[in-house]
Amino acid sequence: HAESRIRTVLVVAQLVMATILLVSAGLLANSFIKLSRVNNGYDPSQVLAFNLLFPDQYSIGRKAETIDRLLTRFRNSAGVRSVGFSRHGLLMREELFLGDWVPPGRSREEMRSLRTRVRSVSDGYLTAMGVPLLEGRYFDARDYARAQPVVVISRSAARQYFGAESPVGRALDWYFIEQQGQPVTVIGVVEDIRQESPTDEVFPEIFVDYRQLLSLMNRG
């Protein structure tokens, strides 16, 4: 009788464990399905990414020249449709906040509390990552280092700074290097990007061409 009771207890325990495992598997599958339906704001299919590490002795100018040469070489490679560079790629957590961004009719004091991430990228990066363009244009060859500073902003940033109005062609004063704001023109709006994880909330972002960022830093 004792052996029979033990056998019964073991069978019940196995059934309970099997039920728990089935429920857990169902929850995991459900979570996976939900995550797969999340719009990350980019398309990673057919994208190859790698990290570029520079020697410590490389100057900023030499780094920029190396990046330009690599981008040119890849763009001339067969089968490559788009090439881009970013200071920090997707799925790499970065909290880079550079100064204050002030839209027309607002003061710097009013906007100090707004936190907007800045992403330093090259022309071609947003295209290569399949980030949808909602309005305006992406960066291109016109946005060279000494050209009029321009930015591309995310949907959330557009709403944060311009409300329901179209931001394309409008200016933001960027208080970064000097006390006097540097006017930059919004040339495009892109979809919000979940940079680190599909479970993260989207964050307002402003994309700056890395050549123009380096030029502004050198002026300062």
Image: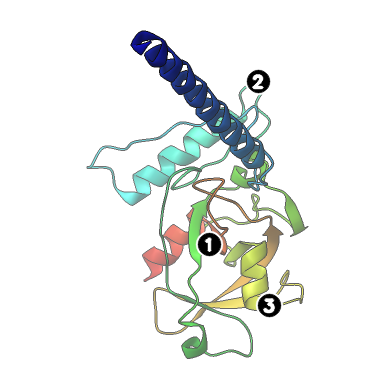
Across and down, in percent, residue 173 comes to 55, 79
Q: Is residue 181 above or below residue 196?
A: below
Q: Tag 1 or tag 2, which sits nearer the N-term?
A: 2
Q: Amino acid at mark 3?
A: Phe
Depth order, front residue of 23/100: 23
Q: Find the distance from the CA under tag 2 to the CA under tag 3.
A: 41 Å
Depth order, front residue of 206/193: 193
Using a 10 Å C-alpha cutoff, classify the residue at mark 2 as few (fewer than 14 neighbours), some (14 to 19) or many (20 or more). few
Badge 3 vs badge 1, beta-carbon distance below 8 Å: no
Q: Tag 3 or tag 2, which sits nearer the N-term?
A: 2
Q: Amino acid at mark 1?
A: Arg
Across and down, in percent, residue 5 comes to 40, 16
Depth order, front residue of 62/197: 197
Across and down, in percent, residue 56 comes to 23, 42
Q: Is residue 15 above or below residue 36?
A: above
Q: Residue at x 49, y 33 (%)?
A: 70
Q: Residue at x 49, y 87 (%)?
A: 108
The residue singled out by tag 2 in the image is 78
The quadrant of the image that shows the N terminus is top left
Badge 2 vs badge 1, beta-carbon distance below 8 Å: no
Across and down, in percent, residue 168 comes to 73, 69
Q: Amino acid at mark 2?
A: Ala
In the rendered image, is residue 48 in sight?
no
At mark 2, the secondary structure is loop
Q: Find the distance from the CA under tag 3 to the CA under tag 1.
A: 27 Å
Depth order, front residue of 78/164: 164
Camera-side mark, 3 or 1: 3
At mark 3, the secondary structure is helix
Q: Residue at x 65, y 50 (%)?
A: 140
The residue singled out by tag 1 in the image is 146
The residue singled out by tag 3 in the image is 162
The quadrant of the image that shows the C terminus is bottom left
